[in-house]
Amino acid sequence: MTHYFTSRFLPFIVALFVFHGTASCLQAEESPAASSENLAVLWTSGDPEVAHRVAFLYTLTAKKEEWFKGVTLIVWGPSQRLLAADKEIQAYVKKMQEAGVVVEACVNCAEAYGITEEIKALGIEVKPMGVPLTRFLKDPEWETLSF
């Protein structure tokens, strides 16, 4: 009887556990266990919807919920133009800074767009980012995510 039950219903039981595990990955019930201690978010998109609905939500939540000890937002390329021009984006970045997210921007892009002073006025360090990004990518203590 036990063998019949096990062989007959085991696939369903396994499927239930797999489904439950998959479903729980989509819910924000508890902090995920992370192997890396820090997160670098590379924000390059000039699309405000990407900023508001994806990049900023995850970055701020990762910091507030302490999913990572350190969280750095790198503003690079078209995202810099959006940041310099959009007051709502600026307010959200300020909110991230107040929560402890480190925000840095690429000096080469800022200079190319002619917005270096606007970015600096937001309290963002503007510097060459090639070497720091490469360090984030190679360092096992850092996860890197891009939008």
Image (cartoon, rainbow, N blue to C red):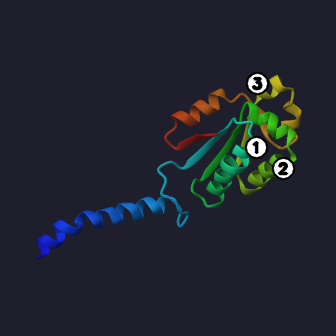
Q: Quadrant of residue 123?
A: top right
Measuring from the top left, give residue 65's x and y in whole percent: 61, 61
Q: Does 40 appear above or below 3?
A: above
Q: Does 101 appear above or below 80?
A: below
Question: Which is nearer the N-term, disc 3 or disc 1?
Answer: 1
> Is residue 66 visible to the viewer in this orientation of the structure?
yes
On-image quarter of the C terminus: top right
The span from disc 1 to disc 2 (Cα, nearest Å) is: 10 Å
Measuring from the top left, give residue 135's x and y in whole percent: 57, 33
Quick check: marks 1 and 2 in contact, CB under 8 Å?
yes
Q: What amino acid is found at the position of numbered circle 3 in the picture?
A: Asn
Measuring from the top left, give residue 41's x and y in whole percent: 63, 42
The span from disc 2 to disc 3 (Cα, nearest Å) is: 24 Å
Q: Which residue is mark 2?
A: 88
Residue appearing at x 59%, y 46% in the figure: 39
Residue appearing at x 64%, y 48% in the figure: 71
Tell me if 12 is positioned left or right of 108 in this view: left
Residue nearest the observer in this picture, 65 or 37: 65
Q: Secondary structure at mark 2?
A: helix
Q: Does 91 appear above or below 130?
A: below
Judged by depth in the image, the label closer to the viewer, 1 or 2, is 1
Q: Quadrant of residue 78?
A: top right
Measuring from the top left, give residue 8's x and y in whole percent: 19, 67
Q: Which residue is mark 3?
A: 108
Q: Which residue is mark 1?
A: 48
The span from disc 3 to disc 1 (Cα, nearest Å) is: 22 Å
Question: Which is nearer the N-term, disc 2 or disc 3?
Answer: 2
Q: Quadrant of residue 14?
A: bottom left
